[in-house]
Image (cartoon, helix red, strand yellow):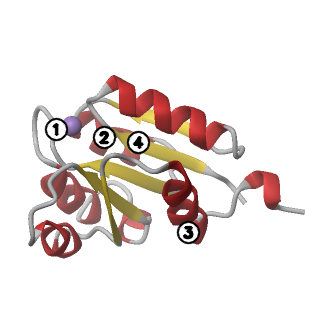
Amino acid sequence: MRSNVLYIEDNPDNMTLVKRALESRGYTLLQAVNGMEGVTTAEREEVNLILLDINLPDIDGYEVARRIRTSGKKNTLIYVPIIAVTANALKGDAEKALSAGCDVYMSKPINIRELWARVEAFVPSPMLQK
Ligand code: MN
């Protein structure tokens, strides 16, 4: 099974943290630093799961999720798992993320064990596959 994870995130510290955490479990991390780059990367590359920051410099994560779900370029994007990751702890954000097409919602700061568990729920770690 393939294990390419696309992380759409403008904060370099979070990007580095997630890259190290996922690569240590054998995943391949694809990176996009804004929403539009995220959408085009999802359409162009083989992506098995998407981690999506909500606060992005161009279009927000909700809009990214909607565009990915309705992509006319690649219909498998209807099903690709999307995990929203955001610092907005405000009530209602989870519902907004879910209604925009995300499957799961995670709060920042990122907890590595939670990250591994959330990702592995959709895409098994290559290091655990026999
Ligand atoms: Mn951000």
In what element is the residue under mark 2? helix
Residue type of the residue flagged with mark 2: Gly
Q: Regarding ligand 1, which quadrant of the image does it lie in?
A: top left
Which residue does the image show at 47% across and 27% down from the upper left? Answer: 16
In what element is the residue under mark 4? strand
C-alpha separation, residue under disc 1 versus residue under disc 2: 10 Å
Q: Which residue is mark 3?
A: 122
Give the percent coordinates (x, y) of residue 124: 68, 63
Give the percent coordinates (x, y) of residue 90: 9, 63
Whether label 2 touches label 3, CB < 8 Å: no
C-alpha separation, residue under disc 2 versus residue under disc 4: 8 Å
Question: In this image, 39 relative to 129: left or right?
Answer: left
Q: Which dot, 2 or 4, sits closer to the camera?
A: 4
Q: Which residue is mark 2?
A: 38
Whether label 1 touches label 2, CB < 8 Å: yes
In what element is the residue under mark 3? helix
The mark that comes first in sequence, 4 or 1, is 4
C-alpha separation, residue under disc 4 versus residue under disc 1: 12 Å
Q: Which residue is mark 1?
A: 56
Give the percent coordinates (x, y) of residue 6: 45, 44
Q: Depth check: 105 or 42 in front?
A: 105
Q: Which residue is mark 4?
A: 7
Residue type of the residue flagged with mark 1: Leu
Residue type of the residue flagged with mark 3: Phe
The mark that comes first in sequence, 1 or 2, is 2
- Dot 3, crowdedness within 10 Å: few (<14), some or many (≥20)? some
Q: Depth check: 46 or 50 in front?
A: 50
